[in-house]
Image (cartoon, helix red, strand yellow):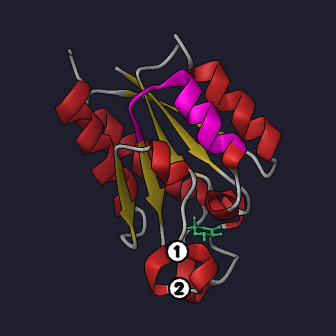
Amino acid sequence: MKILVINGPNINLLGLREKHIYGDESYEALLSYIEKTAKKLGVDVEFYQSNHEGDLVDAIQGAYNRVDAIIINPAAYTHTSVAILDALKAVSLPTVEVHLSDIHQREEFRHISYAGMACEKTYCGLGFAGYSEALKYLVSNYMDK
Ligand code: DQA
């Protein structure tokens, strides 16, 4: 089983940005954390990060017929991007949304998630663990199915 893990704008600055919200571990640390969990679960993961909305749309389109599922943290585009929502709907792959912080406990503009409307499940406020929960969810629901 192959899972594409997509991260949106500023996630590459983990460890530097708003540490009181996102912690002090880097983006590279996040990738190795996910890689480790994936290995344990016996799935392949591929990573993509971009600060550009259209690139994220392209990555979602490129997942069609190539991977089995998507984990996505669209970051700020979560709350604005109908294009990302439409791309997720178009490819119609099993998708799980992840946010490091709890978007519902933050500013009101973060409470809406467009991308989330095309996702089966959302994990937020769990930090890195949200990504491993997403992997576990996809493995238990879609591995060998
Ligand atoms: C985020 C939450 C978003 O509101 C924010 O814009 C981000 C990160 C999270 O992982 O908690 O960049 O998606």
Q: Is mark 2 within 8 Å of ligand 1?
A: yes
In terms of image quadrants, where is residue 129? bottom left
Residue at position x 59%, y 75% from top? 110
The overriding secondary structure of the stretch rendered in magenta is: helix
- Residue 106 is tagged as 2
Q: Nearer the viewer, residue 8 or 82?
A: 82
The local secondary structure at tag 1 comes to loop
Q: Which mark is residue 63?
A: none
In the image, what residue type sits under mark 1? His
Q: In x, y percent, where is residue 104?
A: 45, 79
Quarter of the image for the N terminus: give it: top left
Rendered view: 29 above or below 83 = below
For label 2, the SS is loop
Decide if residue 49 is in sight here. Answer: no
Q: Is residue 23 above or below residue 28?
A: below
> Which residue bears the numbered disc 1?
111
Residue situated in front as seen by the camera: 79 or 40: 79
Residue beneath the point at 65% across and 83% down: 18
Can the viewer see residue 114?
yes
Quadrant in the picture for residue 112: bottom right
Q: Vertically, is 63 above or below 76?
A: above
Q: Is residue 92 magenta?
A: yes
Q: How many marks?
A: 2
Q: Which residues are magenta?
A: 83-95
